Image (cartoon, rainbow, N blue to C red):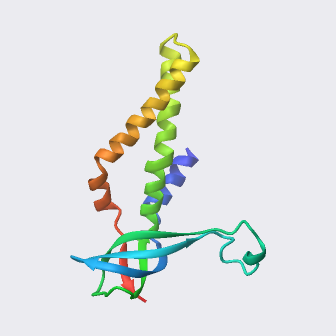
Amino acid sequence: MQFLLYLCAIFCYMDEMIRHTGVVLNTSEGVARVEIVQTGACAACKAKEMCTSSESRQKIIDAQMAEPMQPGDKVEVLVRERLAWRAVLLAYVLPFILMIAAIAILDLTTDWSEAVVGTLSLCSIALYYIGLGVFKHRLQKQFTFTARKV
């Protein structure tokens, strides 16, 4: 029960913004294509030159422009933290719950071998991700980034 209250708190009350700085690559029709550098915890460390575990990756994000922008402008890309948690829920938590539920239901209602039950539970996850792909455009409307000049 506490877990459900925790999830409700995450989705209902979190309205903080996640911010990343980047550079505008190009713009078209109110959308800016922004390149951000996503850094791991080690990448910001001063000793990273002597360590091989530092990592940073470049990401390209399409963001709605809050104001007119030109290629080369430094911008801040914003997304609500609540949407990030919703993405984690859709991408990781729900498929895991679906797999466990499929295993439990198939194991209790059939006398199939563990290999068949496991394979069918993995197939249920594949169908889930195919379903997400079908509704990709609808999800993209909900998960929007906003860019504003720094």
Q: Quadrant of the C terminus?
A: bottom left
Which residue extends farthest left? 29
Quadrant location of the N terminus?
top right
Residue 95: x and y, percent?
A: 47, 40
In the image, residue 107 above or below residue 82: above
Residue 131, quarter of the rendered image? top left
Residue drawn at point x = 21 percent, y = 76 percent: 29
Is residue 86 found left or right of 53 in the rendered image? left
Q: Nearer the viewer, residue 127 or 79?
A: 127
Q: As rendered, which of 131 and 97 lies closer to the eye?
A: 131
Above or below: residue 17 compared with residue 11: below
Q: In this view, does 98 lie above or below 135?
A: above
Point out residue 77 in the picture as x, y percentages from the top left corner.
Answer: 42, 77
User: Residue 15 appears at what percent x and percent y?
Assistant: 44, 69
Question: In the rendering, at what x and y percent does residue 90 appear?
Answer: 43, 49
**Point 32% across, 79% down: residue:** 26
Numbered disc total: 0
**Residue found at x 57% / y 48%:** 2
